[in-house]
Image (cartoon, rainbow, N blue to C red):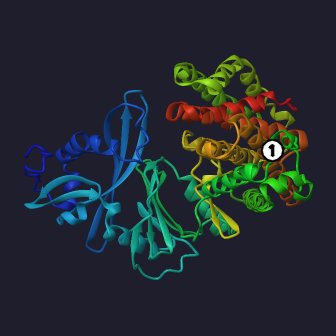
Amino acid sequence: MAKLETSKAKKPSNFDDSWEELMDNTDFVQMFLSEVLEDYIQKQRWYGGKSSKLKYIELTEYFRIQKDEEMYYGLILEVNFVEAFYQHYFIPIAFVTDEDYAKNDKILPISIQGTEGFIIDAINLDAFRKVVFERILNARPHDSTRVQYHKGERLTETEYKSSRNMGMEQSNTSVIINDKCVIKFFRRIYANKNPDYEMSLFLSDKKGFKNTPAYLGSLNIIDTDNLMITIALMQEMVENQGDAWEYMLDKLDTIFDNLGKKNINIESLPHAELFARLPIKDVPHEIIDWAGLDIFQKLQKLAQRTAEMHIVLGSEFEDTNFTPQRFNMDYEVWLKNRLLYQFQNRLNTVENNLHKLKDDTLRLADQFLEQKNKIRKRFLAYDWTKMKGERIRVHGDYHLGQVLVTDDDFYILDFEGEPESTIRDRVVKQPPLKDVAGMFRSFHYAVYATIFNNGDKYPFQQDALYHAGECLYRYFIGVFLETYTKMVQEANLNIGYNQERIFMLKYAMLEKAVYELGYEMNARPLWAIIPLEGIASIMNEEQNL
């Protein structure tokens, strides 16, 4: 067997096996894993192990994705790290002889039975996308084979016409079919159903929730341990004007610009109590004059869609994966163990990166370290016996970037859960206010991002802009809370009494800000001021339970 040559000037490796038998060749598999994929996978933007040191790759599963004479391999790789943990990834591969098809994600030049060509990532191949789509389109109602295709009730397409890359994604790869459907191929794989697949199927097919992309189909496999693993999810293509994060940044830029244009006296702006529910009619005219009415009406609509999502998620009484639950000791122990571990990790990260910080960010980081025992006590103050609300399946990673803007409405998407969480943690039932707290933290981020990105264009000192931003942020929260709380209570979704709700929001927002701190300290230390400011703000509020 020829040794692998990576130089274009040298001949590719030659194997006498047919393409259909290639994965049964142990010499090929060993070479492919150690000499090719170790290098290839680390260069992919969807690879989540860049901060760790790769040790070796194993092939845990492979399966055929085929239709008639066309056949592709789906590989599930176990990436083992020096730090003694592992992750699983999905790569579909194709063999092509035309170099034009191998321009994107060329993995390996190879000769198979004398035919020279390339192994490529099949997702870049139009023919592969067509096979997956047609297998979903023609799926049998009850597929009991190892590779299972499922067709959703709302799929109306009857034939394959075209496909194109969606682009812009980091952790997964999505393609658009017929300009009507989106197939999301999950790159990071878990030994169980992906929550995005499970939640989409439940919300869309079972409950008819309209403000999430309709579930249209999926591809799952049954692994050697008889567990279902989600490979791909197909959903409706929602025409949109972008996500709510970009929408909010645009709105906030106009609002901060108004400070100068309208000669707003920042110091005289009326302040709202944090977490006080506010109908729009009770928002002071000074705030409406400055920010405009439209942004508050949009927040009402977002609160409405959030409430409707939670009402649907709390309405199931047969499927135990979705039935509401009360708080109990097991949940409290799980929560505290998880948060204390995460908190210690963040303390270590801040201590090791203080030298990267300066000015207000350094001051707040020092304050965070000084308050570590108080913050730890806040996390330990959780007492399940005082909680009267319910726990349900929640979005789990709810923020403005997970919401699409469509004319005057919003669509909620991406139910995979928090990237750092294990697959088991992502399906634990949580208080609905955990999602609300995540959205509030996203509002806070948007305010500060606007100041960071455009501060020089506003005729005010940064401290004054922070002051105005914190003021506006409280009104955003108040208007959202009024609509959300009223709707869920009218639908008899139990989110607890007023003190419990405030405690839960503070607790979940503190948790989220601590979570965010790790990302910012590692990726962009200058932005660490946002979660640090959030932590300080919450800690300075009087605890209400």
Horizontal arrangement in the rendering, residue 179 relative to residue 494 (left or right): left
Residue 532 coordinates in the image, percent (x, y): 66, 30
Q: Quadrant of residue 411?
A: bottom right
Question: Secondary structure under badge 1?
Answer: helix
- How many tags in the picture? 1
Q: Return the residue at label 1.
A: 474
Q: Locate the C terminus by quadrant.
A: top right
From this view, report whether residue 87 is shown above or below residue 106.
above
Q: In this orientation, which residue lies closer to the viewer: 209 or 77? A: 209
**Is any atom of residue 317 visible in this view?**
no
Of all residues, the one furthest to the bottom in this rendering is 158
Residue 459 coordinates in the image, percent (x, y): 69, 44
Of all residues, the one furthest to the right in this rendering is 282
**Is any atom of residue 237 visible in this view?**
yes
Mark 1 closeness class: few <14, some 14–19, many ≥20 residues within 10 Å:
many
Q: In this orientation, which residue lies closer to the viewer: 40 or 283? A: 283
Q: In this orientation, which residue lies closer to the viewer: 347 or 289? A: 289
In the image, what residue occupies the spot 37% across and 35% down?
Answer: 80
In the image, what residue occupies the spot 89% across and 56% down?
Answer: 279
Q: Quadrant of residue 121?
A: bottom left
Residue 36 coordinates in the image, percent (x, y): 23, 44
From this view, report whether residue 307 is shown above or below residue 422.
below
Q: In this orientation, which residue lies closer to the viewer: 422 or 318? A: 422
Residue 451 coordinates in the image, percent (x, y): 65, 43
From this view, report whether residue 517 is shown above or below residue 258.
above
Q: Amino acid at mark 1?
A: Arg
In the image, what residue occupies the spot 87% across and 43% down?
Answer: 272
Horizontal arrangement in the rendering, residue 101 relative to residue 135 (left or right): left
